Image (cartoon, grey):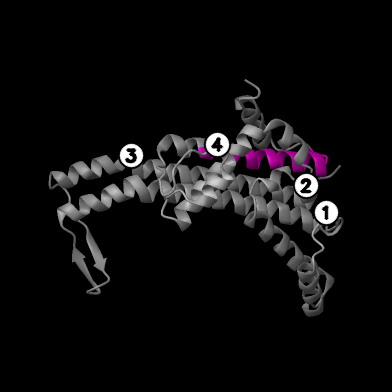
Amino acid sequence: MAITPTEKKINIKFKQYYKNMRDILESFHLIEFYIPHLHHLLKNNSIPSLNIYNPTSRQIEAFSKKDTFGAIDHLKLKANPRRALMDMVSTTEHYLGKICSMVYLEFPERFLINDEDDSAERIKKLSSIIIHSSSKEEIIDIMVEEKIRNLFYGNPVDFFTKKKIKLQLDKVFNSSFAYELEQYAEIVARRNICVHNGGRVDRKYLREVKGASYKLETVLAIDKNYLINSFHILVGLATSATYLIINNIYSKKPSAQIEYIYKQFIESSPKSA
């Protein structure tokens, strides 16, 4: 059976996704590796202190050495690891949304049939989409956009585990990746508190993370090991979803890269240990 245009696009999107994830991790390591050297050079007066824009005076001004050290510490301990985590989670969500959208656009029945949400609000929204759209294609495009947006606004684990998503992922993920999905839920929850609560534990985090014993307002650190583990969890889950979609929906053998990462992920799972 010949490769379909959508299947080919999914393979291309995966290569781009994996490269982007590696780039994010490499950028984190680059900054983490060179910061101590930068600190040493500045301490020995081998490089000048930072010149920075002052929003009060609206001028470029020289930072004191003390303030420059403070900026370096902030970059090392907070900005660099938090930025890496946020980028990895958002890159993964964007990728999953893209391949999901490709499948839905090729097979609209996968999101139009047996949808559990028949609320008055949803019916009103669908009616508005139909009335204000110029063609069937535009209606489907808008409905797919709405579907994808809703997938990642709720429980992020649902994408992998709910049958109603109709990507034929639920059986494998529910039976084989329970541990990894718990970690995924924690990674997304930690990203969320970085974005919305300065990295401090809030009630939403405690609701979403099983067995979390942190006290409210505890600041959760993000170190190199946490980021490396997050990289493998995010890439592993995204690769597994890609593998299953290509294998189950398109009845094709995934690319060598996808198959290799998928098998590595399965072998590294505590369940297979």
- Residue that mark 3 sits on: 33
Residue at the outermost top position: 273
User: Are discs 2 and 3 less than 8 Å apart at CB?
Assistant: no
Look at label 2 and name its amino acid. Answer: Leu
Total count of labels: 4
Q: Dot 4, how many residues are within 10 Å of its Cα: few (below 14), some (14-19), or many (20+)? A: few
When the figure is inspected, residue 68 is found, relative to residue 229, above or below; the finding is below
Q: What stretch is highlighted in magenta?
A: 230-252
3D distance between C-alphas at marks 2 and 3:
41 Å
Amino acid type assigned to the residue bearing label 3 in the image: Phe
Disc 4 to disc 1, how far (Cα)? Answer: 35 Å
Mark 1 = which residue? 110
Q: Which mark is in front, 4 or 3?
A: 4
Q: Residue at x 26, y 53 (%)?
A: 71
User: In which quadrant will I find the C terminus?
Assistant: top right
Cα–Cα span, label 1 and label 2: 8 Å
Q: Is residue 104 left or right of residue 73?
A: right
- Please tell me whether residue 125 is drawn above or below residue 99 in the rendered image: below
